[in-house]
């Protein structure tokens, strides 16, 4: 029997109905207090036939905020609002992990508590502009975190992981990708520290290790995954030896017992740049499940799973526009076209009003 996208798979103690993952997608529609709204409950409910949903990146602390209208998981009100999302997804028979996020330097004083500078491993300004409530504003040079502040960062993740548990999620994903805080520590283009958290990869990985261990202590390793993006240059990221850095990270995360590694394989998130990494180059020493991401369509995803190059495949843009993506793939039905104008922010339009096959 050949394995395809529709073959169920065990994720730790969970059984997923298929290998189609809804990728984490920032949609900037959180309501008051950075809590998910009624619309967000409906949005995830509509997509519950995915084998696994990974939520949009969700901040672990007020300092971890980098964009308007992104949700948090650091206080009780946010956890209560997320509980409505997880209940809705579970009622439809789905599974949902929350993605834990701290943006580090990809922020702006206007988004930070008391107008503070964003924090980072080193005081290196990213190129480009932050999205703020007052429009686009140039990134600022972040403040390098003091060594003695790092236990506080770990504690924020621990608190958020505990809130996610209380909110009824099936697990959590540590976001160590795409140029946010943990990735800023991992890659040497953004980490010039001279303490135990900078220099060789063992040191640059240290914060990822401590955060992941804190999360595992709350959840158990079979409910924790991590996301990595070895060659994605988004957010001014670079590393002098991505293969060495990320093979080390993958091996160590495997030793910690992580249930999956979720890899943004491309040099761009949408797969438009042909350069890629794969399981063989990054995750050879990782024994858990491998989720591939980055510009896959049904045919490429099916081939990847059939060949064992991945165990699951995550879809982003196609999930924005197709709540019933699983059904459409199963029937080889045409897909709705996503509208980039409504990706980030706005109302129900382009969020909960894409039709399913049965509605169309
Ligand atoms: C974004 O808001 O553009 C964003 C957020 C999280 C990611 C990537 C992009 O991992």
Image: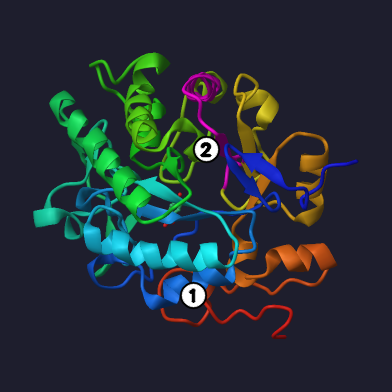
Q: Viewer-proximal residue, 128 or 331?
A: 331
SS at circle 1: helix
Q: Residue at x 26, y 34 (%)?
A: 154
Position of 273 with respect to 42 (left or right) is right
Q: Is mark 1 within 8 Å of ligand 1?
A: no
Q: Which residues are magenta?
A: 246-268
Q: Is mark 2 within 8 Å of ligand 1?
A: yes
Q: Viewer-proximal residue, 70 or 5?
A: 5
Instruction: Identify the residue position indicated by label 1 in the image.
Output: 42
Residue 321 is inside the magenta segment: no
Instruction: Identify the residue position indicated by label 2 in the image.
Output: 229
Residue furthest right in the image: 1
**Residue 71 location, x and y as percent?**
33, 61
Which quadrant is the N terminus positioned in?
A: top right
**Residue 310 location, x and y as percent?**
71, 37
The answer to which quarter of the image holds residue 236 is top left
Q: How much space separates mark 1 and mark 2, taking CA atoms?
A: 29 Å
Residue 267 is inside the magenta segment: yes
């Amino acid at each position: 029997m050949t394995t395809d996208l529709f073959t169920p798979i065990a994720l730790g103690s969970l059984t997923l109905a298929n290998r189609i993952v809804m990728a984490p997608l920032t949609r900037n529609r959180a309501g008051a207090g950075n809590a998910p709204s009624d619309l967000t409950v409906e949005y995830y409910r509509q997509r519950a036939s995915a084998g696994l949903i990974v939520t949009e990146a969700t901040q672990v602390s007020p300092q971890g905020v980098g964009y308007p209208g992104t949700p948090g998981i650091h206080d009780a009100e946010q956890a209560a609002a997320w509980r409505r999302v997880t209940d809705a997804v579970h009622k439809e028979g789905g599974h949902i992990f929350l993605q834990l996020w701290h943006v580090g330097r990809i922020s702006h004083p206007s988004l930070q508590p008391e107008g503070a500078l964003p924090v980072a491993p080193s005081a290196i300004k990213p190129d480009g502009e932050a999205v703020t409530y007052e429009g686009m504003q140039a990134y600022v040079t972040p403040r390098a975190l003091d060594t003695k502040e790092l236990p506080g960062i770990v504690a924020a993740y621990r608190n958020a992981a505990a809130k996610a548990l209380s909110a009824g999620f099936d697990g959590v994903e540590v976001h160590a990708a795409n140029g946010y805080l943990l990735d800023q520590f991992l890659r040497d283009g953004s980490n010039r520290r001279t303490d135990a958290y900078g220099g060789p990869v063992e040191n640059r990985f240290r914060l990822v290790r401590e955060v992941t261990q804190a999360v595992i202590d709350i959840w158990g390793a079979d409910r924790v995954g991590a996301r990595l993006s070895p060659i994605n240059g988004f957010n001014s990221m670079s590393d002098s030896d991505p293969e060495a850095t990320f093979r080390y990270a993958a091996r160590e995360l495997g030793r910690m017992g992580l249930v999956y590694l979720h890899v943004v394989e491309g040099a761009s998130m949408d797969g438009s740049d042909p350069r890629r990494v794969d399981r063989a180059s990054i995750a050879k020493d990782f024994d858990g499940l491998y989720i591939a991401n980055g510009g896959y369509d049904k045919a490429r995803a099916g081939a990847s799973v059939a060949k064992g190059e991945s165990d699951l495949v995550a879809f982003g843009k196609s999930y924005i526009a197709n709540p019933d993506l699983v059904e459409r793939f199963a029937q080889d039905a045409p897909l709705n076209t996503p509208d980039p104008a409504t990706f980030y922010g706005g109302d129900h339009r382009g969020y909960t009003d894409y039709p399913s096959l049965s509605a169309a």
